[in-house]
Image (cartoon, rainbow, N blue to C red):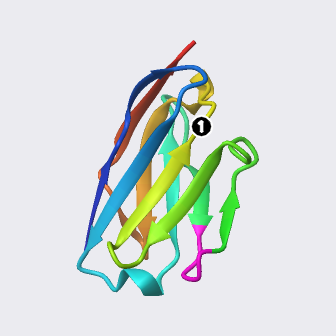
Amino acid sequence: VQLQASGGGAVQAGGSLRLSCKVTGANFRLFPAAWYRQSPGSQRELVAQISADSAATYADSVEGRFTISRDNVRRTLFLGMTDLKPEDTGVYYCWLNNFWGQGTQVTVSS
């Protein structure tokens, strides 16, 4: 199983990004998936998760700003991020069935 994350970058506060995570080697549609992030000096934390039938839940800190979604045909997980804040800075990791992507850096400047 391989998860390939992309879409990170550097933006100013208030900006938007859309992360993607392409999954190969797994029956993507059967499993819940999630996005985590790790900020410098902090533990990895759950940002958003989505069930196999696309029910989504979010961390309080991103509720209303981030949207997790999945495309089962393209076997891809997405994270839409709007109104980004400096505290959203970190490495974002996708997760599926205990497998991790390699991470993509998001940097938000004030």
Location of residue 52 (image quadrant): bottom right
- The relative height of residue 101 versus residue 50 in the rendered view (above or below) is above
> What range is drawn magenta here?
50-54
Count of marks placed on residues: 1
Magenta segment includes 51: yes
| Residue at 43% from the left image edge and 76% from the top image edge | 97
Residue 83, x across and y down, in percent: 63, 31
Read off the residue under disc 1.
82
Q: Is residue 9 left or right of residue 51?
A: left
Figure quadrant of the N terminus: bottom left
Residue 35 appears in the figure: yes
Pinpoint residue 60: horizontal percent, then vertical percent: 76, 47
Q: Main secondary structure of the magenta part?
A: loop
Against 103, residue 30 (above or below) is below
Is 99 or 30 nearer to us in this picture?
30
Quadrant in the picture for the C terminus: top right
User: Helix, strand, or loop for circle 1?
Assistant: loop
Q: Is residue 73 above or below residue 60?
A: below
10 lies above or below 48: above
Is residue 53 covered in magenta? yes
Task: Report crowding for label 1: few under 14, some 14 to 19, many 20 or more residues within 10 A (C-alpha).
Answer: some
